[in-house]
Image (spheres, grey):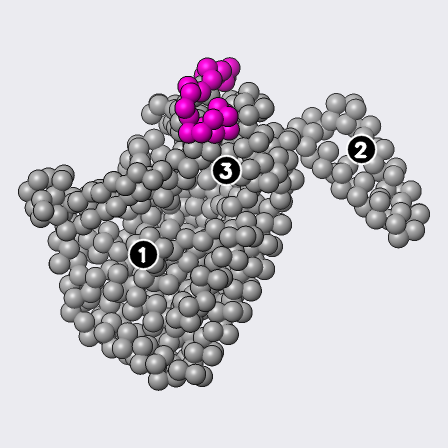
Amino acid sequence: MQCERCNERPATVHLTEITNGQKQETHLCEVCAKEIQLQGFGLLPQMNLHNFLAGLLNYEFNGSKFGQQEAGVKACAKCGVAESQFVKKGLLGCGDCYPCFEEKLQPLLRRIHGNTRHTGKVPERTGGNARLLKEIENMKRKLTEAVSREEFELAAELRDTVRQLEKRLEEGGEA
Amino acid sequence: MSIKDKVGSARSLWMDADGPDADIVVSSRVRVARNLTAIPFPHLLDLEKSREVTAKIRKAIENTEASELIGNLELTELGELTPLERQLLVDKHLISPDLLNDFQAKAVAIRQDEAVSVMVNEEDHLRIQCLLSGLQLKEAWEIVNKVDDGLEKTLDYAFSEKLGYLTSCPTNVGTGMRASVMLHLTGLKITNQIGGVFHAIGKLGLTVRGLYGEGTEAASDLFQISNQITLGQSEEELVNNLTSITRQILTQERASRKSLYIDRREFIEDRVYRAYGILKNARILTLEEAMRLFSDLRLGIGLKIILGIHDKLLNVLMVEASPAFLMKMAGRELSSHQMDVYRADLIRNEFEKAEK
């Protein structure tokens, strides 16, 4: 068998790729296989993840299996990425795509992460009120704990802290 | 030392094998994805716009006020490197294979000891990663966290109060964090328990991937386990979860090794000594065979059957045995047969040196 790429040398590397149940075989010689590898052969698994995600998106966005119908025409106002592009590539265009496609992203995020709310790190400068909100939530939890342990002095202190923080939030937050 | 010099040496900090449980946990890695606000994600940028992003990040990295947090990072555009040098960075685990595609638009900043690297314009504008020896996920996260804080002093991140750090791919949104450990699980594999372990891991929101192998059969018996979920759990929770599961796998791996050594001592010793014998004497070695033999030898070192050889040597050899590194050392193109001969020579020499 000849190499499919150079048609010169015998094919000694046989690659079988199965995407969405479609089997594709590639037969290459060692030289061509190596060249392809240097060009990013190793990227295949990552690409498959995107394909997989795109399949999910298709389902989510169209409500039908594997994109039987054309995806919506709605596009992100900021970067211009259309729903259909997102569905195809599995990648969003910019940060504004998230609020833009929020309605349809929600079920997808729940399916991937089992959750739709961030509870981790908040950047110091660009976090908006998130840092303050997190702090309030944290204090409220401590307050409930203190009450359940009947440590009322501590509870009173915590209640005052929560009030102060909430006041700061009303006044326009940290910024 | 520039990045060009760095790729000339196979050694990185993570290979030192001096971290906790480094006989089984080869390395721990934490990476976070970050994007700049008001700029489309990298896959939508043309070369010019990509370079503007790189310039912004360069400025943030060189910001002297944040240098205590960031450390001494040196940024290089991938276009400045040869294809071979780029591949070497992948082999050393300092950049992802993704960064090689459309490389003109991309850059990487690497810390002197190679424990920290920042990829620019990969799937996201920034990918900050830390790679350490042994089970040190918490430590790796703390380092990444600091570098992230340092960069955020001057960079405006795309962040939402509700969804956290916004990423190109919705599978990374939230913390943007992927934590992983590379484990050497020969004992579980020989005793046919590995399938059960992986099955359990899958139910806990983690994924497993074989390294250095065709598909799921990893010749090296090295497996990478990482978190799948990035939204709804804090970074600390993700790290703690992966750490405790890794500890459980460690306990099982040690137990299976121990029982193997008690019940089938000759079998294990034979396997280890054969691997050692071949590595020290072979004249032709394919990458796959070398990886398999390294795995057996690593088991022998862990069980103290082989003394005087350190895991560190195996970690370095695993990188040096790669095609790109062999060609770099040879200073010329090598056919696959020449490569196998060169690899065998290199490994033989290294073991001779180590035994002296």
Question: Residue B326 lies in what quarter of the image?
Answer: bottom left
Q: Which residues are magenta?
A: A57-80
Q: Does residue A69 belong to the magenta stretch?
A: yes
| Residue at x 55%, y 25% (from the top left corner) | A104
Taking the image as shown, residue A22 lies to the left or right of residue A4, namely: right
Q: Give left or right: position of A122 versus B71.
A: right
The three-letter amino acid code for the residue at tag 3 is Thr
**Disc 2 secondary structure class:** helix
Does A118 appear in magenta?
A: no
Give the residue at x 82% y 28%.
A167
Image quadrant for the C terminus of chain B? bottom left
Q: Determine whether the residue tagged by mark 1 lies in a helix, strand or loop.
A: strand
Chain name for mark 3: B
Calculate the distance from the C-alpha at mark 1 to the C-alpha at mark 2.
54 Å
From this view, report whether residue A147 is shown above or below residue B319.
above
Which residue corresponds to mark 3? Answer: B171
Q: Nearer the viewer, mark 1 or mark 2?
A: 1
Please rate how many residues cluster around mark 3, counting C-alpha atoms within 10 Å: few if below 14, some from 14 to 19, many from 20.
many
What's the residue type where badge 2 is placed? Leu
Comparing A17 with B153, the one in front is A17
Residue B302 % position (x, y): 42, 74
Which residue: 26% across, 56% down?
A: B322
Write down the residue under mark 2.
Answer: A165
Residue B213's tag is 1
Point 22% across, 71% down: residue: B348
Residues at marks 1 and 2, common chain? no
Q: Quadrant of residue B185?
A: bottom left
For the view shown, which residue lies furthest in the left direction?
Answer: A8
Which one is closest to the eye, mark 2 or mark 3? 3
- Asked if disc 1 and disc 3 are in contact, CB closer than 8 Å, the reply is no
| Quarter assignment of residue B349 | bottom left
- Check disc 1 and give the amino acid type: Gly
